[in-house]
Amino acid sequence: MVDYASRQPTGTVIIDTGNTFLYLVLNDGQAMRYGIGVGREGFTWSGEQTVARKTEWPDWRPPAEMLVRQPYLPRFMAGGPTNPLGARAMYLGDTEYRIHGTNKPDTIGKRVSSGCIRLTNEDVSDLYDRVKVGAKVIVLPATSARRPSQPAPDAALRSPDQTSPPNRPSATNAQMPSSGPKVAEVQ
C-alpha cells in the first residue's frame, strides 16, 4: 500500500506505463501498487476502459494481427501454468487488451508486450480478487510519466490523444498502438 492522491473513486485502476506501475485506488488517499510489464515501442496506448470480464486461468488465442507477424504461434493454448496469460485475466472493454498474469516474471518492469498489461501471477491473483467487473481503468500516456517521488497524477484531468490508427479494435477514449517491429512476442 502506498500514498496516492487521486480524484478517482475507490476501485479505479490507474496504469502508469511510463513508470511500469499499476495502482488500485483505495480510500483515504492510498492505493495498492503493483509492478507491471507494458507494451513495447509501437504497442503502447492510453485512454480509459472498463473491466468487461474476468477469467481465472484464461485460454489464449493470439489475435490475427499477432499471427500475421508471427505465423509460428499456436492458434490456441489452454489455460494453465505454461499459458502466456498466466493465472488471471481482466479484459478491457471490447478491445484485445487485458490486464493479465505472466509465466515470465522477469518481464515485469519492462516494455515487452503487444499492449497488454502484465503482472506476476501472485500480483494478478491479488488484483483480480480486489477489482470488480465494470471498474474504470485509466491508462496514462507514457509521455506523462512521473517519478515515484512526484505527486500522483490526477487522471481525471488527463485528456488522452483521441486518434486511433486503422486496423485496430476501437476503444472508448483510447489511443491504440500501431503495428510495431516484428520481434518475438507474447501478449
Image: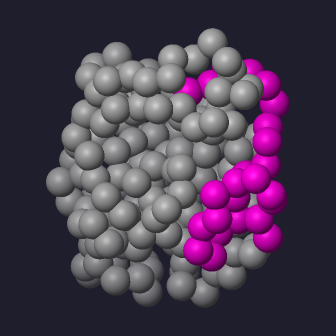
Place of residue 16 in the rendered image (x, y in percent of width and height, measured from the top left): 56, 58
Start-end of magenta stretch: 163-186
User: Looking at this view, is 164 or 2 the one in front?
Assistant: 164
- Report the coloring of the rendering: one colour
Q: Residue at x 77, y 65 (%)?
A: 164
80 sits to left or right of 129: right
Question: In the rendered view of the protein, which quadrant contains the N terminus?
Answer: bottom left
Q: Is residue 165 magenta?
A: yes
Q: Is residue 16 above or below residue 178?
A: below
Q: Is residue 157 magenta?
A: no
Place of residue 186 in the rendered image (x, y in percent of width and height, measured from the top left): 56, 27
Place of residue 95 in the rendered image (x, y in percent of width and height, measured from the top left): 54, 57
Q: Residue at x 45, y 59 (%)?
A: 92
Give the number of marks. Answer: 0
Q: Residue at x 32, y 72 (%)?
A: 134
Q: Quadrant of residue 137?
A: bottom left
Question: In the rendered view of the protein, which quadrant contains the C terminus?
Answer: top right
Q: Residue at x 81, y 59 (%)?
A: 165
Q: Quadrant of residue 124?
A: top left
User: Looking at this view, is 34 or 75 the one in front?
Assistant: 75
User: Can residue 142 be spotted in the picture?
Assistant: no
Q: Residue furthest left?
A: 129
User: Looking at this view, is 157 or 78 the one in front?
Assistant: 78
Q: Is residue 105 above or below residue 178?
A: above
User: Can residue 28 be spotted in the picture?
Assistant: yes
